[in-house]
Amino acid sequence: MLREGAADMGRFDTTRWSVVLQARGDPADARVALETLCRIYRPPVLAYVRSHVYARDAAEDLTQAFFARFLERAWHADADPERGRFRSFLLTALKRFLIDADAEAGALKRGGGYRFESLDEDASDGPVGDDSPDRIFERAWAKAVLGAALARLRREAEEAGKLAMFDRLSEFLVEAPDEDDYARAAEDLHLRRNTLAVAVHRLRHRLRDLVREELAETTAGHDDMDSELRALREALESASH
């Protein structure tokens, strides 16, 4: 879906992670930006915790506690503004947190406290085969980026009065459809196949732009942006195999 290449993202100084890095403290705009990033990228954190050692309930509690500490203790103040990738910083902070959580086991509490258990075997978001927690985190991160971009694209379609078309074509935006699927969609929407193909092409192009915009929100410059785009492509390709 995504092509490698430099993205013309303009200035990075107003993206969420850049705002956080530049503030280095806790002004209102930086706090809001950081909370937004944490909300969007909660799924990969939870996936990492689930795949690492913890059962579902414990993982939910630990994920909540991690973000609470991340915000309350301003861990972002330790991030290097010259190498600003929110993804890498978040994963490093999470690993350190889990090491501390193991040491603190009985002291960390939320509600009834944590239960440090082995991962239950039927977990849908647990490890697959020999996948490491890091790889599971990367794939969940990529899905979160793609999901955020798709949500924005859907809102744009709704505002343009084309929500029904978007919902029918959304399955074609990430993976190429086969001819039968295309034909059925064209029939459902009362469109010629060529017209449908143009609509899908435009949606895919806009989705690529929105993915790049989402990645820009978690980086502080073009070099990091290009690196994140490559990592995203690799993670999505890995998830499709």
Image (spheres, grey):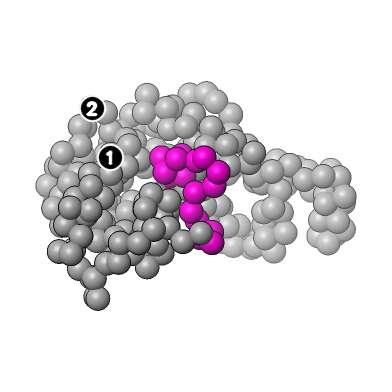
x, y percentage for residue 9? 42, 32
What residue sits 41% from the left and 64% below the top?
56
Helix, strand or loop at label 2? It is: helix
Which residue is more in the foreground, 192 or 127? 127
Name the residue beneath numbered marker 1: 92
x, y percentage for residue 177? 77, 45
Which residue is more in the foreground, 130 or 189? 130
Looking at the rendering, the stretch of residues picked out in magenta corresponds to 122-137
Q: In this picture, is 152 found above or below 212?
A: below
Local packing at callout 1 (Cα closer than 10 Å; few below 14, some 14-19, many 20+) is few
- Is residue 102 among the parts visible in the rendering? yes
Name which quarter of the figure residue 91 lies in. top left
What residue sits 17% from the left and 52% below the top?
103
Q: Earlier in the sequence, mark 2 or mark 1?
A: 2
Left or right: 42, with 210 as reference point:
left
The disc label shown at residue 55, or none: none
What kind of residue is marked 2?
Answer: Glu
What kind of residue is marked 1?
Answer: Thr
Magenta: predominant secondary structure element? loop
What residue sits 45% from the left and 40% below the top?
132
Q: In this picture, is 236 found above or below 180?
A: above
